[in-house]
């Protein structure tokens, strides 16, 4: 497992040590690491190609070298690994507290951290788990490109709501991070869709579901298509100037 500690995390750790909040910060980072380990473990069960885990002072990211056409159900399974490990860790700490292995002070910190992380991480904002979950659900309803666009719009709406309701310094930092992430997603919409199509051309996926569409921009995840009465394979061969 390759784990990368972001530079900002070291800076926050230093300030937390100087200000007397090191214990809180240590337990926060431990919980974040356990959460991301859950993503890593669950993703390994479905054969995802793992890249690295990045630990930020307010959360983490587990990165993969996977195709955009990877099964939505596999991605959902991997996504649920984070909250599963985090809740298991919480109940373990609760059991240790009940049996007097950790103090009430430590358990209260862990309980607060778990509440805050779960509340924040499951907001429907990309790249948070809630945003990814939203995108997976939308992928099952809409075309791949439209699902991404709707996810970005909903993310922007909830960033605005989050900013209005939270005005602390930490919230401002989180808002800046989320805005940068959403802007990056917006800039990559066309690139990701072109990659999504190219993967289907190169790998010639076989999906059980067949969907009839009239536009290449309506390709849907986990589906094989008939585009303007032409089978997807033939359509892509023609699109990329390759003879069948």
Image (cartoon, rainbow, N blue to C red):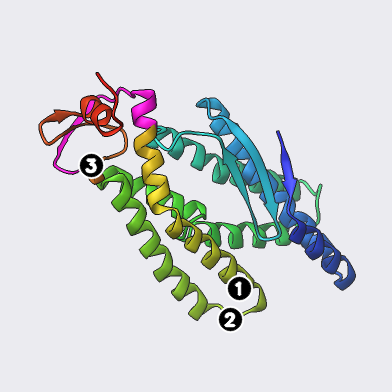
Left or right: where 213 falls relative to 44: left
Q: Nearer the viewer, residue 41 or 206?
A: 206
Relative image position of residue 59 (x, y in whole percent): 64, 56
Q: Which residues are magenta?
A: 199-216
Q: Is residue 209 magenta?
A: yes
The quadrant of the picture occupied by the N terminus is top right
Relative image position of residue 124 (x, y in whole percent): 43, 59
Relative image position of residue 236 (x, y in whole percent): 27, 30
Q: Earlier in the sequence, mark 2 or mark 3?
A: 2
Relative image position of residue 230 (x, y in whole percent): 14, 29
Determine the CA span between mark 2 and mark 3: 44 Å
Q: What residue appears at the point 44 percent right and 39 percent down from the top-left corner?
A: 76
Q: Mark 1 — residue?
A: 171
Compared to 213, does 165 lie above or below? below
Q: Mark 2 — residue?
A: 167
Q: Is residue 65 magenta?
A: no
Secondary structure at badge 2 equals loop
Q: Nearer the viewer, residue 162 or 93?
A: 162
Compared to 183, does 94 lie above or below? above
Q: In the picture, residue 63 is in which quadrant?
A: top right
**The disc label shown at residue 208, or none:** none
Q: Mark 3 — residue?
A: 216
């Amino acid at each position: 497992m390759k784990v990368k500690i972001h530079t900002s995390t070291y800076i926050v750790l230093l300030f937390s040590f100087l200000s007397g909040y090191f214990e809180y910060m240590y337990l926060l980072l431990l919980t974040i690491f356990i959460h991301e380990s859950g993503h890593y473990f669950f993703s390994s069960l479905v054969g995802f190609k793992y890249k690295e885990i990045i630990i930020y002072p307010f959360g983490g990211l587990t990165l993969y070298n996977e195709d955009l056409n990877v099964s939505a159900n596999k991605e959902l399974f991997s996504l649920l690994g984070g909250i599963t490990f985090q809740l298991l860790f919480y109940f373990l700490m609760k059991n240790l507290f009940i049996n007097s292995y950790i103090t009430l002070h430590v358990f209260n910190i862990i309980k607060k951290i778990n509440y805050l992380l779960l509340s924040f991480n499951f907001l429907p904002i990309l790249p948070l788990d809630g945003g990814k979950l939203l995108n997976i659900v939308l992928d099952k309803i809409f075309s791949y490109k439209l699902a991404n666009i709707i996810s970005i719009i909903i993310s922007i709406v909830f960033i605005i709501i989050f900013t209005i309701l939270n005005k602390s310094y930490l919230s401002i930092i989180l808002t800046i991070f989320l805005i940068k992430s959403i802007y990056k997603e917006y800039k990559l919409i066309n690139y990701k869709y072109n990659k999504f199509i190219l993967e289907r051309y190169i790998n010639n996926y076989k999906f059980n579901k067949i969907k009839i569409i009239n536009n290449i921009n309506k390709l849907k995840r986990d589906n094989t298509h008939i585009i303007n009465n032409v089978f997807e394979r033939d359509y892509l061969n023609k699109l990329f100037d390759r003879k069948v």
